[in-house]
Amino acid sequence: MSTWQQQGIDPAPYWRRNLWVCMAGSFTTLVAMTLLLPFLPLYVAELGVSDPAAIARWSGLAYGATFFTAALTAPLWGRLADRYGRKLMLIRASLGMAVAMSLIGMADAPWQLVALRLLAGLLGGYASGSTILVAAQTPKAHLGWALGMLSAGIMAGNVAGPLIGGLLPPLIGIRATFWLAGAVIFCAFLATCLLLKEAPPPKAQPRAHAAIRLSLRSGILPLMLLTGMLLIFANMSIEPIITLYVAQFVPQADRIAPVAGVVMSAAALGSIISAAWLGKLADRVGHWPVLTGGLLAAALLLIPQAFITSAWQLVALRFFMGMALGGLLPCIASLIRHHVAHQQVGRALGWSTSAQYVGQVCGPLFGGMVGGWLGMRMVFLATAVMMAAGTLYNLYQMRRAGEKP
């Protein structure tokens, strides 16, 4: 019997506090994962690499290493969370990230930087673990809103990371920036240990494995994995071409990079603003209608992006596209939560996280290849076609499942 059961404590009233703790921890860990983007080449050069081509190669390896191992291990951590408890996985992730970030600040060679970034991805996973805990412990009537708030915190971390990484190194130095990030994550570790309350993990039941096999056979879980990958894919497909595309509409060379940065941030800002609202709407009208509506809106908003005549038109369209996509990842997590046995939620959401990392890798590859072969405008149109196909397939599955459009 757990301590909570012995003391007669019900963890349900703590779901809001759990949400705030998870939001803060996800924000800080994702800031730490992304803050090195602006100064990564400088740090590689500080570690003794002088050739520009070698600096580029080591920088690419170091940045992608964390997301590579995170994608591989997300299903494992999700499965262990189902078995041993979600809070324990968050404690592991926050402490592991705090140690890894501090060690990165002590690297003496580029291979050590890559190895420690691999370690950060292996030991991390706080954001995906938070999604599992919030999805499993939040009352179903508030699930969409709670996951929307968590998603907003996660996206805010992804946006704030590069901004903080651009400000801190000139003030305190590159190595001290990593140490400070490690200290902040350690605070998230303490908050997770002391403030987060979790219900005892349910006992494994034979029917749980049958339930997840049923969801696989029915196509619901694979569809959610595919849809999650598609959302990230659509958002990332313009990354390789955005600076070149913006340069066609900005005559001043010194303004190209700042405007491209605004374009990249516009979608994330729109998603941060809309995530909680769309999640709350999904709680009221259903998650599948919000999911299909958002997919369709994003597909339609991609088309005019191919025919803009001003960079600021692209900023506005990316912002509205971000608003359309903002609540969709919470909807995907909610649908997985509703269609998978409680004992398998962590495992299924771990797969969902891995699928999203696949979209993060494939989106830029797709955009680069299509932009190089067919022109940059075709990247938007091709992505719109894929989003429209995803909308139709979700509508088909929604009708098969007996949901009302």
Image (spheres, rainbow, N blue to C red):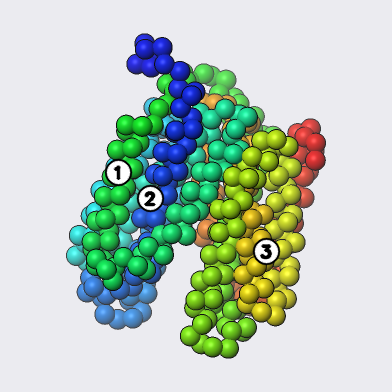
**Side (left or right) of 219 relative to 132:** right
Decide if residue 323 is in sight here.
yes
Q: Which residue, given by chain and number where applicable, does mark 3 sit on?
A: 383
**Callout 2: few (<14), some (14-19), or many (20+) C-alpha neighbours within 10 Å?**
many
Task: Find residue 332 and report its image quarter.
Answer: top right
Give coordinates of residue 174: x percent, y percent: 26, 66
Would you place residue 148 above or below residue 198 in this image? below
The residue depicted at 74 percent of the width and 49 percent of the height is: 293
Along the line of sight, the residue nearer the viewer: 14 or 326: 14
Give coordinates of residue 72: x percent, y percent: 44, 48
Pointer 3 or 1: first along the chain: 1
Inspect the image, locate mark 1, and give the three-letter code of the amino acid beneath it: Cys
Q: Which residue, given by chain and number where applicable, does mark 2 sit on?
A: 28
Q: Are marks 1 and 2 in contact (CB under 8 Å)?
A: yes
The residue depicted at 26 percent of the width and 55 percent of the height is: 180
- Count of marks, rendered view: 3
Along the line of sight, the residue nearer the viewer: 124 or 196: 196
**Callout 1: few (<14), some (14-19), or many (20+) C-alpha neighbours within 10 Å?**
some
The residue depicted at 59 percent of the width and 72 percent of the height is: 369
Pointer 1 or 2: first along the chain: 2
Judge depth for marks 3 and 2 and give the one in front: 2
For residue 187, the mark is 1
Task: Find residue 324 and report its image quarter.
Answer: bottom right
Q: For the residues marked 3 and 1, what is the alpha-carbon distance in whole angstroms?
A: 40 Å
Q: Quadrant of the N terminus?
A: top left
Would you place residue 62 above or below residue 13 in this image? below
For residue 71, the mark is none
Q: Are marks 3 and 1 in contact (CB under 8 Å)?
A: no
Inspect the image, locate mark 3, and give the three-letter code of the amino acid beneath it: Thr
As helix, strand or loop, the secondary structure at mark 3 comes to helix
As helix, strand or loop, the secondary structure at mark 2 comes to helix
As helix, strand or loop, the secondary structure at mark 1 comes to helix
